[in-house]
Image (tube, rainbow, N blue to C red):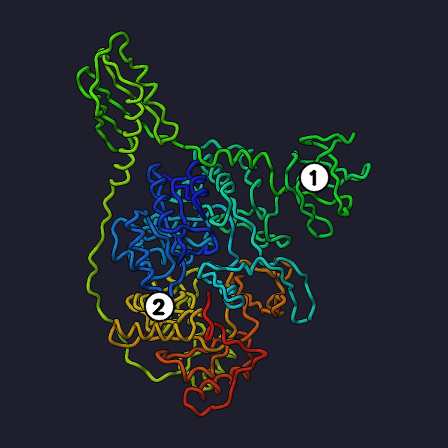
């Protein structure tokens, strides 16, 4: 059966999800979750959540889908042990250290590979199946046909996002929030840099192509494709930051869709809670130019009418949808929003009305124009209905009772429910009825009062033996039976742990520091070779979203797990920054998979690098083989979406150069041959002066993107001079350069 997986940022949202028909809930704790600004759960509320869910046959998955720094590894392992003891069903992870600890230590707690891992192909899925994953959450960029192919071949449960907010960047490969605002998306603290307005500049001409929310994605909505989706193991709704009413609305509609009862009206009701307008996403092959809403980055609402004139000091509104008193609307006037609650609604005669279907009149102090569009952002009555049903029981479970009531004996009830059994026995002895013995109907009446439980009385066996059963005794019996079956259900699953095996130590000889380079052009490549760099990444780069893998010669730079799976027995390889390695355990795992060197995350500072190296040496009696980017424009985000196509520049992008601009600066755009796009930092990461102080790293990489051959030569010579000590002058330029996170810890 296809699992419907719902989000919960707090207990109220969790109850809303369960009461509207989800099969599983995912939620986060105070640490290591990718929604750090959600309310989230502590130990006590998580215990409550697990008990509440498990009594209703709903699973709980906890998100630990952030990168983990070296000094957090102990907290990470402690939290995992706590989650296992509480009884969560699975953990959604990004970091290899977290993944490996679950696989190596727990039997009953599943390891789910987060979309943050960037798994978007069969090869990456097979790799994690081999390593012990219980489920893979595929990247949002994967099309449905490819999802089905992966499922058919890999034979591992798959999970995909089907509704809610989308990231413009490939998940796990967005550094924009961190490098600009020092709040990392890989740490669950994304500031939503993609939801800001940007000006698109044609650098070839200096012309501005307009200012808009160029990177703001629409919200995903795939309910029209439910027949295709039913083939997938788990359908995931995004929304841990959303209110309970939103969760209730979306979950209920997808529940109906899976059950075959959804109506067109139900589908339309999805727009009545938060939405940025909808897209079918890459999942169902949306045209990339239609996947963003560049007009507005937050709740768009839905169109309900237009300003058609004025009348007696009021604005006349011609409606296409019903408007109710106390609804919240926004009016688009000269590309500026006017937001208001409709406290008073009038008819043409100036009488107050509760609703209007065709025409109404509103007093608004702001100046409007004929033709201004009205959007409804919150429907009062719809929300009221949702909120009234937040805690209802979606499904009840059969309670079967056999009642034995003999005069002179104790009341005995044999109860079965939730797959558990309990034998109730009263303290008091029953007496023979003087006049009216207790009937089966009376017993049923008292024992069926189960509205505040998960049970519904299914079958009750009772023979009348002229006994009198006090109502108080029956009520007490009902409460005891319910409590006992609850306890039996919650205690029925014994949590098992594994004894970790002794692991082999992997260490590398410490080598003298040297320079490597990655380049984008043949001119840059030639300049590096001429300067004497032995390892240059050019046509030997295997990106994360490789369409297909083909045999290659020599050493490779691999940016995704699929590439590791395909090439690990074919070529020596170095892993790229896109794997977000931030601790010694992740390094160790990649060495076990065959990596010659591991490139560290951009989001590590100097202290954290030192701690990683020290910890690795302590655990393995030797050094790790590490690479680190010390120069170049950092890739802020890598996306399947092309902003240039959105702005009508498709076909000319290769002959021109572009950038986006905000109040902080300009950010160059790199268009790749497959129409994917990288947006670069406007400032150049420059740690060349720091090279002599960085211990434990053997390879220092220069990342060239937009530089000319002459500029490449100058940088390479300066870097080599820092390596051999011949260059003593300061190379850092405060106007054009940045040290990134090197001297500043990211949040």
Question: In this view of the protein, can residue 673 be seen by the observer?
Answer: no
Give percent across and percent down for residue 510. 30, 81
Q: Name the residue nearer the viewer: 686 or 311.
A: 311
Instruction: Tell me which label, 2 or 1, sits earlier in the chain.
Output: 2
> Measured from the top left, where is residue 381 in percent x and y?
59, 34
Q: Which residue is mark 1?
A: 305
Q: Secondary structure at mark 1?
A: strand
The answer, for residue 242, to whether it is visible in the render is yes
- The image shows residue 686, relative to residue 224, as above or below, that is below
* Residue in view at x 61 percent, y 66 percent: 660
Q: Tag count in the figure?
A: 2
The structure residue drawn at horizontal position 36% and vertical position 40%, both measured from the top left corner, is 53
How far apart are labels 2 and 1 at the CA level?
56 Å
* Element under disc 2: helix
Residue shown at 27% from the left, 33% from the top: 485
Q: Which residue is mark 2?
A: 70
Horizontal and vertical percent position of residue 567: 34, 66
The quadrant the N terminus occupies is top left
Is residue 637 or residue 497 the one in the foreground? 497
Note whether 346 is above or below 401 in the view shown.
Answer: below
* Mark 2 or 1: the one toward you: 2
Residue lying furthest right: 312
């Amino acid at each position: 059966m296809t699992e419907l997986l719902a989000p919960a940022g707090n207990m109220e949202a969790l109850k809303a999800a369960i009461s509207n028909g989800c099969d599983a809930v995912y939620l986060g704790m105070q640490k290591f979750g990718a929604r750090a600004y959600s309310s989230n759960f502590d130990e006590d509320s998580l215990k409550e959540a697990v008990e509440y869910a498990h009594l209703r046959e709903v699973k709980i998955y906890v998100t630990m889908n952030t990168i983990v720094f070296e000094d957090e590894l102990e907290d990470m392992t402690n939290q995992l042990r706590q989650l296992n003891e509480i009884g969560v069903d699975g953990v959604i992870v990004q970091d290899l250290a977290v993944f490996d600890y679950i696989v190596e230590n727990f039997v009953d707690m599943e390891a789910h590979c987060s979309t943050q891992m960037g798994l978007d192909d069969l090869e990456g899925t097979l790799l994690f199946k081999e390593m012990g994953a219980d489920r893979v959450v595929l990247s949002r960029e994967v099309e449905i046909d490819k999802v089905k192919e992966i499922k058919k071949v890999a034979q591992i449960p798959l999970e995909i996002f089907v509704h809610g907010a989308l990231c413009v960047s490939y998940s796990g490969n967005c550094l924009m929030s961190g490098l600009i605002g020092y709040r990392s998306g890989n740490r669950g603290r994304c500031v939503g840099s993609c939801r800001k307005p940007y000006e698109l500049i044609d650098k070839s001409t200096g012309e501005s192509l307009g200012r808009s929310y160029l990177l703001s994605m629409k919200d995903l909505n795939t309910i029209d494709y439910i027949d295709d989706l039913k083939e997938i193991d788990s359908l995931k709704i995004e929304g841990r930051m959303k209110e309970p009413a939103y969760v209730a609305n979306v979950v209920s509609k997808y529940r109906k869709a899976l059950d075959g009862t959804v109506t067109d009206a139900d589908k339309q009701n999805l727009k009545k809670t938060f939405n940025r307008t909808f897209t079918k996403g890459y999942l169902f092959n949306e045209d990339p130019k239609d996947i963003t809403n560049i007009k507005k980055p937050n709740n768009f609402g839905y169109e309900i009418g237009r300003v058609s004139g004025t009348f007696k000091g009021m604005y006349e509104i011609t409606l296409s949808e019903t408007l109710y008193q106390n609804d919240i609307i926004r009016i688009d006037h000269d590309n500026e929003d006017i937001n208001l609650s409709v406290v008073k609604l009038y008819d043409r005669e100036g009488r107050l009305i509760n609703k209007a279907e065709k025409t109404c009149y509103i007093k608004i102090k702001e100046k409007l124009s004929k033709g201004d569009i009205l959007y409804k952002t919150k429907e009062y009555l719809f929300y009221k209905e949702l909120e009234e049903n937040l805690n209802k029981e979606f499904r009840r479970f059969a309670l079967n009772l056999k009642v034995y009531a003999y005069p002179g004996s104790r009341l005995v009830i044999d109860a079965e429910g939730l797959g558990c059994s309990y034998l109730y026995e009263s303290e008091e002895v029953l007496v023979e009825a003087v006049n009216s013995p207790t009937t089966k109907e009376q017993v049923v009446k008292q024992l069926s009062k189960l509205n505040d439980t998960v049970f519904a009385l299914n079958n009750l066996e009772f023979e009348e033996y002229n006994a009198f059963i006090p109502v108080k005794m029956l009520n007490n019996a009902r409460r005891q039976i319910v409590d006992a079956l609850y306890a039996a259900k919650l205690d029925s699953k014994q949590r098992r742990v594994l004894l970790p095996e002794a692991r082999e130590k992997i260490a590398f000889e410490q080598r003298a520091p040297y320079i490597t380079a990655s380049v984008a052009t043949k001119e840059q490549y030639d300049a590096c070779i001429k300067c004497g760099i032995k390892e240059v990444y050019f046509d030997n780069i295997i990106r994360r979203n490789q369409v297909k893998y083909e045999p290659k010669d020599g050493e490779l730079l691999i940016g995704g797990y699929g590439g590791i799976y395909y090439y690990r027995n074919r070529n020596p390889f170095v892993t790229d920054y896109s794997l977000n390695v931030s601790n010694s355990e992740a390094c160790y795992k990649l060495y076990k998979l065959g990596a010659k060197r591991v490139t560290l995350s951009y989001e590590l500072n100097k202290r954290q690098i030192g701690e990683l190296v020290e910890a690795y040496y302590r655990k393995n009696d030797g050094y790790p083989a590490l690479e680190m980017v010390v120069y170049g424009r950092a890739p802020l985000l890598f996306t399947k979406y092309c902003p240039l196509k959105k702005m009508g520049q498709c076909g000319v992008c290769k002959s021109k150069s572009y950038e986006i601009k905000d109040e902080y600066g300009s950010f160059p755009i790199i268009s790749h041959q497959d129409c994917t796009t990288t947006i670069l930092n406007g400032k150049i990461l420059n740690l060349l002066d720091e090279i002599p102080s960085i211990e434990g790293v053997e390879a220092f990489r220069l990342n060239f993107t937009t530089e000319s051959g002459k500029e490449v030569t100058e940088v390479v010579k300066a870097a080599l001079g820092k390596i051999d000590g011949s260059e003593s002058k300061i190379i850092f330029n405060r106007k054009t350069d940045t040290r990134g996170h090197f001297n500043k810890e990211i949040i």
